[in-house]
Amino acid sequence: MTEKVLAAVQSGEKQTIVKTFDIPEIPDDAGLLRVEVSGVCGSDWPDYKKYIGDRILGHEVVGYIEKAGKFAAERWGVKEGDRVALEEYLPCGHCPRCRSGEFRLCAATDKWNGGIRFGYTTVHETPSLWGGYSQFLYLHPNSVFHKVPEHVPAREAALALPLGNGIEWAVNEGGAGPGKTVLIQGPGQQGLGCVLAAKQAGADCIIVSGMTADKERLELAGKFGADYTIDVQKEDIHERVKEITGGAMADIVIDVASGGPSTVTLAIELVKIRGTIIIAGKKHQEIPGFYSDKLMSKYITMKGVRGHSYDSVERAIQLIASGKYPLGEMCTHDFGLNEVDRALKTVGGEGEKGAIHVTVNPWS
């Protein structure tokens, strides 16, 4: 095995350079992953627009266990050579959140309050290789894995986390299933994941809304099982949902839009009495015109969500491996390690057009 590794390091606001690192010594309780491919999450873009120190981004990672210490292999239930999808979380494993299965909410994973996680921690934290835009990634003792079948194309395997989010938000939190009408605001990779999840769960009616620029994404939503798509720049969404549902409105509204806070107040109008609203798209600003009394008068449940459970990622990998849906059509762009800046800007709308899910192959 090589003693050196190349990685794309964020070196400033929207700046990346490729650097060489030494392969670290791997203790008995840790390991090393040979990265096959890493997806570019929508959250990587706002992270890339701010600089907290040199770091290797990328947390939708698929690869092969290159090395596993003897204690680590036993703890993880994997062996060298296994193909895995890696979760971004590095939970402590012993707090009440971890013990109850909600390890994504463990304080040790909280990147906003000093926690460490893959794709966010700076290279100054030994041993530096914390992100997926790299040929190799250090496997912390608390790493969380999912085995990936060999027949699954790498770029589709990198959808495990975004599709896991869709299952978590639409089904586990939203309650999508038979008899339910689900409205999804925003047809990006997370929104499409929610479409697939709702379809798999047996929802009676799936509606997806987007902008005129989302034409291809809305078409793909139809292939994934959406019964109706709405271009909000061409149609009155309230009237259209009212028409589709016979005036009942949606049982579940999932807001994964990133364009601004207006979709939150709109969701309150589009959900039915005793309906559920899932807020999954960050707005990065306060919500003007938010009138909380409507939550009471319509008896609405509104939930903020983030991330995925272990089970939802397992189910996502099963869905991907089934070949039931044309998931390859989500995989629109692939970049090499020296093109990571371009990959991130493509996701952020400043690069190539038509992106849905973008991947980085560190060996191309």
Image (cartoon, rainbow, N blue to C red):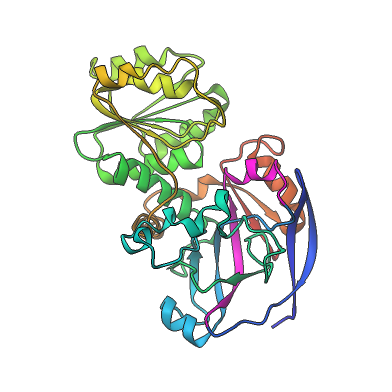
Span of residues in magenta: 29-52
- The quadrant in which residue 78 appears is bottom left
In which quadrant will I find the C terminus? bottom right
Nearest the camera: 289 or 332?
Answer: 289
Residue 51 is covered by the magenta coloring: yes
Which residue is drawn at the image coordinates 62% and 46% (left, top)? Answer: 44
Q: What residue occupies the far left of the structure in this picture?
A: 179
Query: In the rendered picture of this protein, how many numbered marks are placed on residues?
Result: 0
In which quadrant will I find the N terminus? bottom right
Q: Is residue 198 above or below residue 212?
A: below
Q: Position of residue 157 (x, y in %)?
A: 49, 59
Which residue is drawn at the image coordinates 39% and 67% (left, top)? Answer: 94
**Does 322 sit left or right of 116 as displayed?**
left
- The quadrant in which residue 35 appears is bottom right
Q: Position of residue 327 (x, y in %)?
A: 46, 49
Which residue is drawn at the image coordinates 42% and 12% (left, top)? Answer: 236
Which residue is drawn at the image coordinates 74% and 56% (left, top)? Answer: 54
Visible in this render: residue 201? yes
Visible in this render: residue 249? no
Q: Position of residue 359 (x, y in %)?
A: 61, 53
Q: Position of residue 60 (x, y in %)?
A: 54, 56
Q: Is residue 250 above or below residue 3?
A: above
- The quadrant in which residue 321 appears is bottom left
**Does 221 sit left or right of 250 as displayed?**
right
Nearest the camera: 178 or 279?
Answer: 279
Residue 130 is covered by the magenta coloring: no
Q: Is residue 134 above or below residue 182?
A: below
Q: Is residue 302 above or below residue 339?
A: above
**Does 208 sit left or right of 297 as displayed?**
right
